[in-house]
Image: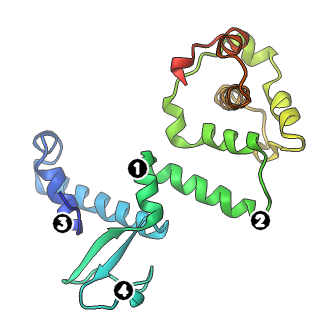
Amino acid sequence: MNLRTEQDCENIFLNSYAAYSYWKDDAQRQNLKAEISDAIQKCLNYNLIRYRDKNVPPAECRRGFLTPTESGFLTPTQLGKVIAIKGLSVQSTSEIISWAKDLGRRKPEDIEILYLACSIKDAADFYINMSTYEYKNIPYQKMLEDVGQGFSLAPINRSPTYEDIKIMKKAIILNHWISCESTIGIENTYNIHFQGL
């Protein structure tokens, strides 16, 4: 099914099993409609989709130029297609875009990219074990900064929380993994099982 308009997006939700539980009355359907509009606006803002119009030449359908019309329809951008294929959420995409803008023309260290990959919203679903002892005694922040040769976590500007330290641990583990170290060695060193990652 092609989702070419806001109405198409609404219809796919309203024709689902969840519609019988969550969107029974008009107020709930209005909420759904508002959420879809908000999601589409976010996708437009991050250049993941754009409006096209069969009555407007493609060159004039640049991002921000065209607003919804009777003859208009939604279409994914190249970036939007990549993000969809990779299964990233719009929230994670916005975090990556923001990071890339802040980076400017500087080439990031591998560990910076891994740290970003471990800190985006979608990565929170990937469980990794970390004991209270590790949290309190293993200097993951220093290890991360040592690997990054100048990479600083200064933006945290506070004492790292348990979740912050867990993100650092994930990034360090992935750094060992992309360095072709033995999986068993990494599992033993960090007390993890790789199916989790």
Q: Is residue 47 above or below residue 182?
A: below
Q: Is residue 162 above or below residue 41?
A: above
CB within 8 Å, label 2 to label 3? no
The crowd level at tag 3 (other Cα within 10 Å; few <14, some 14-19, many 20+) is few
Image position of 163 (left or right of 141): left
Q: Quadrant of residue 170?
A: top right
Query: What is the secondary structure assignment of the residue under circle 1?
Result: helix
Residue 10 drawn at (x, y percent): 19, 59
Quarter holding the N terminus is bottom left
Closer mark to the observer between disc 2 and disc 3 = 2
Residue 176 drawn at (x, y percent): 73, 26
* Marking on residue 58: 4
Residue highlighted by disc 1: 85
The alpha-carbon separation of the residues under discs 2 and 3 comes to 40 Å
Residue highlighted by disc 2: 105
Indicate the amino acid at tag 4.
Pro
The alpha-carbon separation of the residues under discs 1 and 4 comes to 24 Å
Indicate the amino acid at tag 1.
Ile
Quarter holding the C terminus is top right
The alpha-carbon separation of the residues under discs 3 and 1 comes to 23 Å
Residue highlighted by disc 3: 7
The crowd level at tag 2 (other Cα within 10 Å; few <14, some 14-19, many 20+) is few
Indicate the amino acid at tag 2.
Arg
Indicate the amino acid at tag 3.
Gln
